[in-house]
Image: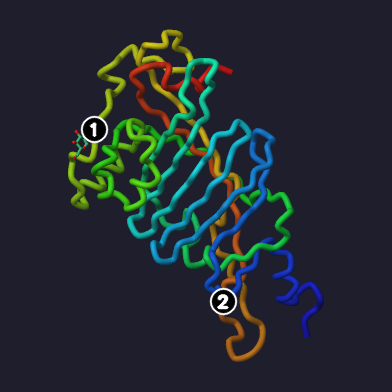
Amino acid sequence: MFSRRDRPGSVRTVLLVALVASLGAAAELRVRVRLSDGHIAEETLEADGEQDSVTLEFKQGDGTLITFLADFKQEVKLFRALILGEPERGQNQYQALCFITRLNSNEIIPSESMARLRQKNPHAIRSAEERRTEDQLAMNVAVNLSRAWQLSAHVHNMCAEAQEAIYTREVDVKHWLDKGVEGSVFEILPQEEDVPDLQTCATSRDMWQACSCRYSLRLEWYPCLLKYCRSREGVSKGSPYKCGIKSCSKGYRFEYYVAHRHLCLWDEET
Ligand SMILES: *[C@@H]1O[C@H](CO)[C@@H](O)[C@H](O)[C@H]1NC(C)=O
């Protein structure tokens, strides 16, 4: 028979999160993660089977609320950052940014698998098994909120507060136009060729000058792949079954045009 180490049961016990049959309870998972700023955040992962979507949300050490939504139906992913302002510098309570781009297959596990995840060791601080590289995304197109439902039913809820700051990429726009989305959803922002002396906001000093703004975020822990095991007993011997998840961390750096430096106060030289 099997040695102790080989027993499928012992494989399962080392998994942080178990896949179990869904009992119809709220498909919500809370995971404690250490962010790159050292802050320990409680991340909420929520799966909506009906909408075929997954939402991930956490608060950074600086108070910024990050929300990520994967819309599998429309193959779109949405990022929202609610950045706290500094009232002593005359800023609003918070500034909202929304980034919309295509969701590729195998970026994150399907909503139906996410809905089956159950928490083990809720107090453990997790770190991802795989740290993926940072994507750099040139968000050179603005999206009109009142028409954006054509991209995803979730844009309206997610991006309402960002109104003037909803961005996407030109390559994504081409794809959506081919699929029949109307051109009036999009507005091309000034490009580097139009504004040859466009500075990065990090180096610009003039608060009223246009500049190229950067915003970076990292999803520190999310289930990115399903793990398969082979059953060793019974009639189904040898056939693969889902027995856990692999966790990943992934960074994103968005770059986009702003008409005034003061819309991008976090982007400073370090
Ligand atoms: C966005 O779309 C709405 C309704 O279709 C329109 O009234 C508005 O002018 C558009 N906004 C911009 C900035 O183009």
Whether 6 is drawn above or below 245: the answer is below
- As rendered, which of 200 and 122 lies closer to the eye? 122
C-alpha gap between disc 2 and disc 1: 48 Å
Direction bottom: furthest residue:
235
Residue at image point 43% right, 17% down: 262
Q: Is residue 217 left or right of residue 230?
A: left
From this view, report whether residue 5 is shown above or below residue 247.
Answer: below
Residue with the mark numbered 2: 240
Q: Which mark is residue 187?
A: 1
Q: Is residue 27 left or right of residue 177?
A: right
Q: Position of residue 5 (x, y in %)?
A: 79, 72
User: For the residue with label 1, is its CB less than 8 Å from the closest atom of ligand 1?
Assistant: yes
Q: Position of residue 232 (x, y in %)?
A: 66, 82
Tag 2 secondary structure? strand
Mark whose residue sits in front, 2 or 1: 1
- Front residue of 13/53: it is 53
Q: Is mark 2 within 8 Å of ligand 1?
A: no
Q: Amino acid at mark 1?
A: Glu
Closest to the observer, 90 or 99: 90
